[in-house]
Image: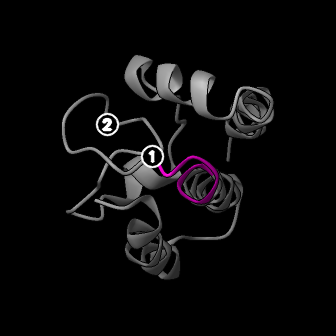
Amino acid sequence: MDGLAAVPVRAAVLLEARAGVGAERAIANLMVSALIGAGSKLGTHEDGAQNCPMFYNEERNVALIMGEQRLDATCRGHLKKAIPDELPALEALLRVFDAETE
């Protein structure tokens, strides 16, 4: 599935998100997913790590969207080749809210 095609599906879940760190983390996670899709043409995946921002969350599981995310090994390897200069910034964005709790 095309990475950008998943963004509206994921963004719709934000309507259910409550204010706070979880909602802020969800926005960061979705931003990373959109930037990856636009910058690298990497699509989403149904297998592999569910906490990867490129995981296709068909059930729209809010806990996955609002939870801490990390690029899985396959996606990270692809991005290391496709957009190596941007990869550190994308990974840093995924970690912005790690130390915070609600």
- Mark 2 / mark 1, whichever is N-terminal: 1
At horizontal 43% and vertical 74% (from top left) the residue drawn is 13
Residue 98, which numbered label? none
> x%, y% of residue 80?
61, 22
Q: Is residue 97 magenta?
A: no
The residue that label 2 is drawn on is: 50
Question: Would residue 15 appear left or right of 1 to someone viewing this image?
Answer: right
Q: At label 2, which amino acid type do we have? A: Gln
Q: Residue furthest front?
A: 82
Packing grade of label 1 (10 A; few <14, some 14-19, many >=20) is: many
Q: Nearer the viewer, residue 91 or 80?
A: 80
Q: Secondary structure at mark 1?
A: loop
Q: At label 1, which amino acid type do we have? A: Leu
Q: Quadrant of residue 2?
A: bottom left
Q: Secondary structure at mark 2?
A: loop
At horizontal 21% and vertical 62% (from top left) the residue drawn is 58
30 w.r.t. 99: above or below: below
Total labels: the figure holds 2
The residue that label 1 is drawn on is: 42
> Taken as a whole, is the magenta stretch helix, strand or loop?
helix
> x%, y% of residue 94?
67, 37
79 w.r.t. 40: above or below: above
Q: Nearer the viewer, mark 2 or mark 1?
A: 1
Q: How is the image coloured?
A: one colour
Residue numbers of the magenta segment: 36-41
Q: Quadrant of residue 34?
A: bottom right
At horizontal 40% and vertical 35% (from top left) the residue drawn is 51
